[in-house]
Amino acid sequence: MTAYVLPPPPVNSLAVSGSGERFPVRRILCVGRNYEAHAREMGKDPTREKPFFFMKPADTIIDDGATMPYPPLTANLHYEIELVLAIGKDGANIPEDRALEHVWGYAVGLDMTRRDLQTEAKDHGRPWEWGKAFDHSAPIAPLHSVAKVGHIAKGRIWLAVNGKVKQDQDVADLIWSVPEIISICSKSVELKAGDIIMTGTPSGVGAVVKGDRITGGVAGLGEIAITIG
């Protein structure tokens, strides 16, 4: 048995819908600007260039229904609703036509963003992590297995703040589809069972403040709800 100088950290995990079991999370990979209208609202050209990725640590996950503490160092905390997929089978250089074989399930998630810190980083050509990879920045609802819901390629994706709809689009509007995202990502890093991929957000992102209630959903996957504490 390996001896450690400190107690190992706990396994980070996601709830599984309809089950007492949880899905162990290895890392979170995120696709940037994957809906045309969102790319435009961020001041970028939405043409179909090669997608880019950033990461969040696995311990940024919080469960559906949680209260998310308002994070430090920001005055501009933004919501971003996303279709989330969970990898259940290892693979590198995965062909696009075999990519869905590697998906264990799907969920609704939020890529919470310290927009002021992200903007400052972009303006100076620096990494985005301080704007994206902070504590509690990845609220994710319970996973739904492919065995139960199939693969998600279309359907409404939406978000509301205090009951007012802010984001409302269709998953079919992804610039890069789920199979394409998996295939492209796997050419750079070997995907492992336990990896989570957040696929990008539609237009309509905006700021929230303490006390706001965020709700959202993806057709076929239910909803997520968190409160900003």
Image (spheres, grey):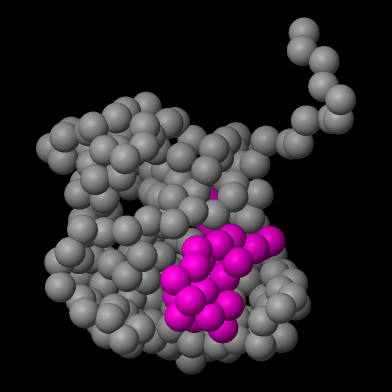
State the residue lying farthest toward the bottom.
164
Name the residue: 31% across, 34% down. Answer: 102
The answer to which quarter of the image holds residue 61 is bottom right
Judged left or right of residue 215, residue 173 is: left
* Residue 175: image location, x then y, percent: 20, 65
Q: Quadrant of the C terminus?
A: bottom right
The answer to which quarter of the image holds residue 6 is top right
- Give the magenta range: 116-142
- Magenta span includes 64: no
Viewer-proximal residue, 192 or 15? 192
- Magenta span includes 140: yes
User: Image height check: is 79 above or below 153?
Assistant: below
The answer to which quarter of the image holds residue 189 is top left
Judged left or right of residue 229, residue 12 is: left
Confirm whether residue 137 shows in the render.
no
* Residue 4: image location, x then y, percent: 82, 22
User: Image height check: is 184 above or below 162?
Assistant: above
State the residue lying farthest toward the front.
124
* Residue 84: image location, x then y, percent: 41, 55
* Residue 21: image location, x then y, percent: 60, 35
